[in-house]
Amino acid sequence: MSGFVFVSGRSSLDFAGTMLWRRTIRTELLGDSGDLSRWFSEAGLFDLVDDPDTVDIEYARRVREAIYDVVVGCLGSGDDTSVGRMNFDPESAAVLNSAAATPLPTVTLDIDGTAKVTGTTRNGLSLLARDAIELLASADLAKMRECSNPDCTRLFVDVSRGGSRRWCGMAECGNRKKAADYRRRHKELST
């Protein structure tokens, strides 16, 4: 199992989620070039990506952290009046703008009618940076949330019917919280 989870509703936010537990036991999911290549593949962004090198890995982590910083900086306090206020490091915006300026992956149509997406790590990071920038300029910004688990730092777009999604995913944080609440209630009843 890779540890990659795609629950955010945007590829840029799923990419930001490759650093887990930012406030506690920071867990890096992009440890080496194989991890990055596998993330691109599992995210469905490429059919074939060139093998990244160590410089690409470091750059990918910088882009990931810039995405996280900019999106969190735009979340504000969570009320409608603060959404859209930009409160992030200008260097993060510069990293995203630089990454977004790189050409996108190449899409080709084979003679049999199948499309293939190929490119480099930098092409994939351009796609992710553009996705983050487009998110910040879209109506989805008002639907941005951070997981309600105080230890979790996953971001997601809440497209639930009532706009009341609290967890990055039930398998990760939602079920843990529900189980903890159940144990707490059960303990209270037995004392």
Image (cartoon, rainbow, N blue to C red):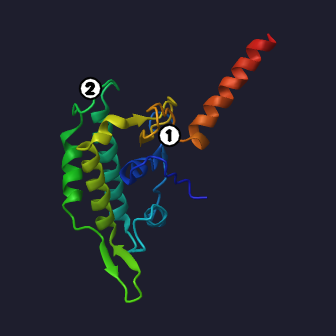
Residue 186: x percent and y percent? 76, 19
Which residue was labeled with disc 1? 168
Q: Is residue 42 left or right of residue 66?
A: right
Q: Residue at x 27, y 61 (%)?
A: 126
Cα separation, mark 1 vs mark 2, equals: 21 Å
Question: Please, what is the three-letter code of the amino acid marked with disc 2?
Answer: Ser
Name the outermost residue toward the right. Answer: 190
Q: Quadrant of the C terminus?
A: top right
Question: Which element type, helix, strand or loop, lies under badge 2?
Answer: loop
Q: Residue at x 26, y 43 (%)?
A: 136
Residue under the image location 43 percent in, 50 percent down: 14
Label 2 packing within 10 angstroms: few (<14), some (14-19), many (20+): few
In this rendered view, identify the residue nearer to me: 4 or 32: 4
Above or below — where is 114 with respect to 16? below
Q: Quadrant of residue 80?
A: top left
Judge by depth and name the residue closer to the eye, 38 or 127. Answer: 127
Label 1 sits on a secondary structure element that is loop
Is residue 145 shown above or below 128? above
| Side of 45 relative to 90 (left or right) | right
Residue at 38% x, 77% y: name it. 116
Dot 1 or dot 2, earlier in sequence: 2
